[in-house]
Image (cartoon, coloured by chain):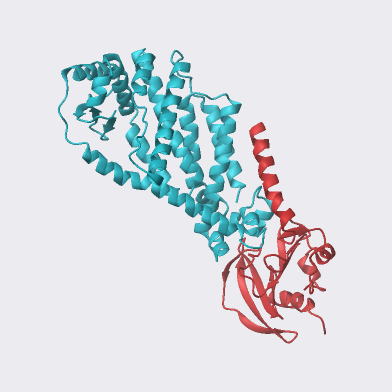
Chain colours: A cyan, B red
Amino acid sequence: MIMRFLSSYPGMYITQSVLHSFVALIIVELSFFAWDIRDHHAKFRYRLLTLTLPVFMFPLYQVITPQRSAWYFRLNTALFDSQRWLELNPLGVLPLATVFLAFLIAITAVFVVQEILPIFRERSSLSDLGTCKGTLDALDAVLDSISSEIPITKPSICIIDEALPILVTQGFKDHTIMVSSHLIEVLDEDQLKGALTHEAVHIMRDSSTKTQLIYLLRILMFYNPVSLVEFRRVVHDDEFICDAVTVSITKNPAALIAAISSFYYHPGHGSQGLSQMKERIESHSHNLLLDERIQKLRETSLEGQESFGWAPFMLTASVILVMGYLVV
Amino acid sequence: MVTILLVTAILTVLNWIPSLMQKQTMKRFNSIDIAKKELRIHRLFVPTYIPEDLHLVWPPAEIYAQEVPFSAFIMHLRYRDSRDIGLVIQQADANAPYQIEPLIKIKTTTAGSQISIKDRKAVLIPAVCDGNVPCYEVSWDEDGTIVTLICKCSAQDIVKIASSTLPGP
């Protein structure tokens, strides 16, 4: 039953897209090593290959070679045939096809808990943030100066009465930067400028639209463990890129580092059991990203952005496509 | 270049491991005898007659066989003057959970007719195969084994070849 599903077109799509993602991931990571790619701008583009190509590879190959899924191709042409593994039953208890399917179901459950439920939670928490308490002339002036340096339409600013460090940009066409009163209190003018410039760079790069499009790919690959990891890494890369652009504009990495430091989060002891563990894991991962951003700013604050090499990029994409063709 | 070699090596090793754990899955054999010996196939349907004017080469160019997940034996016969396959002979367990797609692709078929091959009830189907070549398929159930022949030849020729796979006059 399971093997029959995995041998059908939907089953083959699921199996091969996961395998193609793994192959793409390995090739992209080896490319980083081979061409000494450290720039997050370049890494962002390479990682997009891992997220995007596996969505289209199976249907593309089937159009090119309809017999690609038949046993003859698997046996004589393919470098790797997934069915050889899926048909195995090493202990005679559980076929690997069942284990594989159970693994994908577990990944789907993680996707729902990690990616879907927070959307609904975020919606309610954003509405919990309350209404705008207006703006400040000083903040308006900072935004005026940022808008003169970055080619964006000046976003509106909204101060919310909140004791936590909150700085988010909302909207796709008309943007609003929401900043908590807590941040205005703890950050000095330079640090605020750094933080607001970072948000303005997100607007300039159209990060919201990009993230939504990448998220759409992520939804399509809800069962894919590689997409689960790579989606996060792409979103993190976008943060690194915006940090680097911010510093190149403000020329003040120390102020941005100080602003980022104010976002460290240490959960209290209110919650218990699983929810406490979940909160701790989330805050730890959040703090790790902040650590990495600060470290990166310290390392590369004075370096300019590396130029992007299209030749290695196209070569990497070609290798992924050729190797993927031979993985069935 | 190193990346390609490394990924190729990883995939090749990963593809090889299952054959260590499960030896009787589909694989290619150099001769019918070797396949027979290795897989302990009880009964093989091998033709003893192939019309000379078909220009098909014996022994088969390709022999594939498996015991797991079900018993199957496949022979591909090429033409003498080209790389094309002109005759496919397949035998598989009648209770197989899925069919092994023959290498000669049948594009369109017309209604088949019941014929008798040495007292066995068989179905003969006129068809058009890949390359828009007229072809025929004949198949029958031999004590729980489905024997199928697909040949880019006439109905008379495929029936003669099919008959020659069975014992008796």
Q: Where is residue A170 in the image (x, y as percent from the top left)?
A: 26, 34
Using the image as rendered, state which of residue A176 and residue B83 is in the foreground: A176
Using the image as rendered, state which of residue A127 and residue B42 is in the foreground: A127
Quadrant in the rendering for residue B63? bottom right
Using the image as rendered, state which of residue B90 and residue A245 is in the foreground: A245
Left or right of A309? Residue B4 is right
Residue at horizontal 41%, vertical 20%?
A244
Quadrant in the rendering for residue A119? top left
Q: Where is residue A57 in the image (x, y as percent from the top left)?
A: 52, 46
Residue at horizontal 16%, vertical 24%?
A135
The answer to whether one can see residue A188 in this image is yes
Residue at horizontal 65%, vertical 56%?
A84
Using the image as rendered, state which of residue B132 and residue B102 is in the foreground: B102
Left or right of B64? Residue A273 is left
Q: Position of residue A139 (x, y in %)?
A: 21, 19
Determine whether A8 is above or below B45 in the image.
above
The quarter of the image holding the N terminus of chain A is bottom right
Q: Position of residue A67 (x, y in %)?
A: 60, 56
